[in-house]
Image: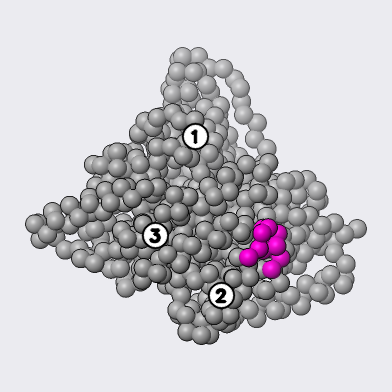
Amino acid sequence: MTEKYEGLIASNGVAIGNLYLFTRDKVVISDNKIGENDTKEEFAKVKKAIDDYRKDLAKLEGASEAQANIAKAHTELLSDPYFTDTIESKITNELKNSEMALDETIKEMVEIMSQIDDDYLRERASDYQDIGFQVMYKLKGITPKTLSNLDKGSIVISKELTPSDTSNMDKEAVVGFATDLGGKTSHTSIIAQTLDIPALVGMGDISKNVKGGEKAILDGNEGVLIVNPSEEEISKYELLIKEQKEKKERLKEIKDKQAISTDGKKIEVSANIGNIEDLKLAIENGCDGVGLFRTEFLYMQNTDFPSEESQFEVYKEATQMLGDKPLIIRTLDIGGDKGLDYFDFPKEDNPFLGYRAIRLCLDKKEIFKDQLRALVRASAFGNLKIMIPFVVNIDELKEARNLIEEIKKDLDEKGIDYNKDLDVGIMVETSSSIIMADKFIKYADFFSIGTNDLTQYTLAVDRGNEHIADYYSNFNPAVLRAIKHVIDVSHEAGKWTGMCGAFASDTQATKLLLGLGLDEFSGSSAKIAEIKDTILTSSQEEEAKFAEKVLDCELTEEVENLVKEHN
């Protein structure tokens, strides 16, 4: 009997194969009590387990890029003093045994990361979860199951997939993923997009509804898993897969082309990154530059605020890697929900609207100036631009620019080179920056729309609240009108507007955003070629007429239907 299950689309595409149910070994955590004389021995067990896992990670240094990246990320997290100090404290002060101390520490770290109001950073909780599994296996002497020996044409079904699971996976055998848990920016989603494999996440309990071995169709375009499909359905999807392969071949030829519409509108298609590894992948995928370099990881993976010099080296390397292509680096967007182990943030009832981003930076100027100085110095090596986040009034932007001018003057006196024409823009994501866009553009060299927060604040919808998830839509007419207003204001001033929110990666919105006049798309590097393909085959003038029709809509559903028909 045919069964259909819906999920969140993590990676587009269609696959036909047999289901492989991947279940992780159940680990029972010992609750044995220990005495004060046992604490050193218990902590030594954890240290040995961590060291054993480190040795496994060291072996991956010469492996595939995906495995090497995971090894590097996990090694850095294992080196975080907070991790080992917390485990030691639970053993020494609370007399928890080694297994309980490790388990509780991992759960706490996952909980902290899961509360961050940034999809990219929040989904990094999977790395902590993965480390917990791997160290616990070492602690208990368990050899974990892997996905390294699968039959060709396997569609992996699991409750969740960790970085270690996917790094050890037989990538020639797997044609798709479907998991109970995960979001659109989860590790599973990122890996699926990187490998260009269709995937569905957030399916609830799909791992409990299948046995494994069933014939299935995974439709990553419509968000459906069809188990035991009919012959008619298989024939239909086989045709789609053929078309999909032809499209992939075409996109390989397109990825390095300049995105110019049929009527001559030149568009930059850039990538959002969080580190140098992300940048390498973006360059491979044909990015025209970087529209958003999140600098939070430089701070979150340190035991203290990173020095000017350490930041400079990272920014310099990224700038040099891109050459003449633009590199837009967002200044520190931390505080409130994104905490640091080494800095005490005030307790707030609503951290999303609290002490964060530019507010914190202007209050802690010495910390901010270290970053700005590193950025200005790095601008000498390429086309670096600075972007200020979460701006709500003109004074914030003016003050940030004044600090940059002070730094330039000091560098001039010391004979240190930098780009004299360094651009400074703002991330438009608050209602005030939309309403006051005509004033902000006097002091900003460019706008970049952060649709994740812009949509959340415009619609007064917490995008992480499942009870009101239906209210959150980038296609809401109010959101689209806000986007159009910001773009028009920048154009009237002879400047440009980009978009670095998730909406820029939504290929269903590419034609609409082109019609609204967007100058730069910056999102997932896996979507670069597809966005370029759409722009290369579209007329900006014709899409502008379509956008006018969309802006006249009153309901989100109307917009979505129009866009679906138009595409």
Q: Which residue is mark 1?
A: 350
Q: Tell me the mark number nearer the camera, choosing from 3 and 1.
A: 3
**Amino acid under label 2?**
Ala
Q: Tell me the mark number nearer the camera, choosing from 2 and 1.
A: 2
**Mark earlier in primary sequence (2, 1):** 1
Nearest the viewer among 85 and 325 is 325
Q: Which residue is mark 2?
A: 544
* Numbered badge on residue 438: 3
> Badge 1: few (under 14), some or many (20 or more) residues near its Cα, within 10 Å?
few
**Mark earlier in primary sequence (3, 1):** 1
Q: CA distance from mark 2 to mark 3?
A: 22 Å
* Residue 228 figure quarter: bottom right
**Mark earlier in primary sequence (2, 3):** 3
Read off the magenta span.
552-562
Point out the residue furthest to the bottom here: 263
Q: Residue at x 62, y 29 (%)?
A: 29
Q: Main secondary structure of the magenta part?
A: helix
Q: Does 206 sit above or below residue 348?
A: below
